[in-house]
Image (cartoon, rainbow, N blue to C red):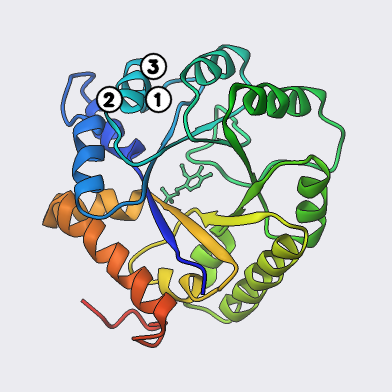
């Protein structure tokens, strides 16, 4: 059975800081606590509008992280330059629109995008493992494989929105099918977006998935429990689901 890694996305620690444009809470401090609590990696999204994480955060994360750093970015040339200079372990390419509240869909790979191809090449040459954030469709998986990247991250938004309702099983099936197709195409499979303590376990049982990127739910819980407990509990739920020591909890009746 493939091990399942938890990468904690610390963007929303910075969101709270930016609400006052001050220097607390510090996302880099949060990252060190997440690592000590069992996170396998730290994820941060440097957006073109710098609405949460800023350049200084990224520079400090690259210096301080003792696990691995996964930087999410779009194809903005200035940000690509910065990431190529820093050479984090992983760079996940995402679509970005200024007006969106969060990343709303996967990359559109249906049309030839020269800038995307060029960005993948630049990141690869800099030594980053490149992952593409895509919708969980076989078409997107096939197109990602054609771009020669080693990994993809499946957008779990549909599951996150529907898991309690009738559409939930279908959304999960879609993730299972896309994860299988990706493995068959030789891609490492990551997943994330909207995963919470209540809906993570069914996704964690998908054997082909090896990495989950989770942010908002962990940072939200940390307000009440601290980020150490919030990280450790998410890691435990993932471990239990993956090892089958506890049946996936679909009703959300734990803690
Ligand atoms: N993966 C990607 C590519 C994302 O853009 C995000 C959101 O920044 C996440 C995972 C984490 O989503 P959430 O904050 O909903 O857990």
Helix, strand or loop for disc 2: helix
| Residue 184 image-quadrant placement | bottom right
Q: Which residue is mark 3?
A: 55
N-term mark: 2 or 1: 2
Residue drawn at (60%, 68%) of the image: 208
Looking at marks 3 and 2 on the same chain, the residue that comes earlier in the sequence is marked by 2
- Ligand 1: does it lie within 8 Å of the C-beta at label 2? no
Return the x and y of residue 239 as percentages of the image width and height: 35, 71
- Contact, mark 2 vs mark 1 (Cβ under 8 Å): yes
Residue picked out by circle 2 = 18
Q: Residue at x 71, y 71 (%)?
A: 177
Q: Is residue 96 left or right of residue 217?
A: right
**Residue 141: percent from left, percent from top:** 76, 55
Looking at the picture, does residue 192 appear above or below residue 1?
above
Instruction: Say if mark 3 contacts mark 1, CB within 8 Å.
Output: no
Q: CA distance from mark 3 to mark 2?
A: 14 Å
Q: Quadrant of the C terminus?
A: bottom left
Distance of label 2 from label 1 (alpha carbons): 7 Å
């Amino acid at each position: 059975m493939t091990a399942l890694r938890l990468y904690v996305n610390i963007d929303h620690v910075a969101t709270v800081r930016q609400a006052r444009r001050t220097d607390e809470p510090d996302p880099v401090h949060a990252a060190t606590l997440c690592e000590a609590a069992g996170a396998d990696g730290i994820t941060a999204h440097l957006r073109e509008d710098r609405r949460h994480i800023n350049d200084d955060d990224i520079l400090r994360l690259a210096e301080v992280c003792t696990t691995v750093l996964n930087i999410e970015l779009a194809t903005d040339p200035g940000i690509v330059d910065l990431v190529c200079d820093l050479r984090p372990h992983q760079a996940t390419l995402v679509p970005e629109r200024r007006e969106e509240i969060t990343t709303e869909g996967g990359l559109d790979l249906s049309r030839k995008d020269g800038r995307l191809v060029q960005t993948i090449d630049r990141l690869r040459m800099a030594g980053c493992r490149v992952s593409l954030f895509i919708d969980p469709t076989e078409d997107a998986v096939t197109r990602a494989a054609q771009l020669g990247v080693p990994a993809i991250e499946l957008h779990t938004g549909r599951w996150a929105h529907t898991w309690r309702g009738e559409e939930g099983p279908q959304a999960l099936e879609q993730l299972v099918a896309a994860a299988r197709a990706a493995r068959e195409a030789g891609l490492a499979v990551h997943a994330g977006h909207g995963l919470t303590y209540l809906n993570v376990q069914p996704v964690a049982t998908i054997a082909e998935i090896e990495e989950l990127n989770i942010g908002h739910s962990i940072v939200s819980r940390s307000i009440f429990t601290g980020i150490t407990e919030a990280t450790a509990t998410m890691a435990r739920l993932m471990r239990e689901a993956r090892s089958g020591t506890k049946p996936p909890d679909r009703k959300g009746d734990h803690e």
